[in-house]
Amino acid sequence: TAYEILTCDWSSDVCSSDLAEVACLAQKYPQIPADYIGYLREVGWGPIGNSTYVIYRGLMNADAIYDAKDAKELSHILFFGDDFSGYCGGFDTRRHFALVEVQPTDMSCLDTGKSFEDFIKEIFRRQGAH
């Protein structure tokens, strides 16, 4: 599969209850990118590689991460992970679930122009985990 190269460096036991959660997530957000759902089904969630990025267990609303002011500005983003330094990745629900990254310095929301799969592969490349 597309994620075989990634799973060799990170062992994950995706159990049936996890798969049920992924199915519920896909049903709740039918526009969600298929490669994100595929990643959750094949790899699961948790830290990636040497733990410089984490994929959340499901999608999080901005109010679960940010203060009230910033959460209101980012309420259209469903977040899937972060790099432990304030850079959060998510899907912009206003723009057909485009993958975006929120910058911690000014809370700007930047379109990555990448698929979820390419975003994850870039994280592994940066870590040197081929």
Image (cartoon, rainbow, N blue to C red):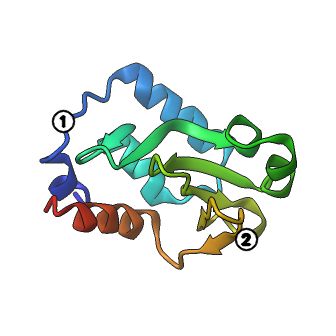
| Picture quadrant of residue 88 | bottom right
Q: Nearer the viewer, residue 126 or 22?
A: 126
Hey, which residue is sitting farthest front in the picture?
Answer: 105
Q: How far separated are the C-alphas under marks 2 and 1?
A: 33 Å
At label 1, the amino acid type is Ser
Q: Is residue 5 above or below residue 44?
A: below
| Residue 99 - label | none
Marks 2 and 1, the one that precedes in the sequence: 1
Q: Secondary structure at mark 2?
A: helix
| Residue 95 - label | 2
Where residue 69 sits in the image (x, y, percent)?
87, 48
Q: Please name the residue that numbered disc 1 is placed on.
A: 11
Picture residue at 23% right of the left edge, 46% below the top: 50
Which quarter of the figure is the C terminus placed in?
bottom left
Question: Would you call the spot at circle 1 few (<14 residues within 10 Å), some (14-19), or many (20 or more)?
Answer: few
| Picture quadrant of residue 124 | bottom left
Where residue 105 sits in the image (x, y, percent)?
65, 63
Left or right: 11 in relation to 93: left
Q: Secondary structure at mark 1?
A: loop
Q: Is residue 122 above or below residue 52?
A: below
Q: Nearer the viewer, residue 60 or 39?
A: 60
Hey, which residue is sitting farthest top in the picture?
Answer: 17
Q: Is residue 122 above or below residue 19?
A: below
Question: Would you call the spot at circle 2 few (<14 residues within 10 Å), some (14-19), or many (20 or more)?
Answer: few
Left or right: 68 in relation to 109: right
At label 2, the amino acid type is Arg
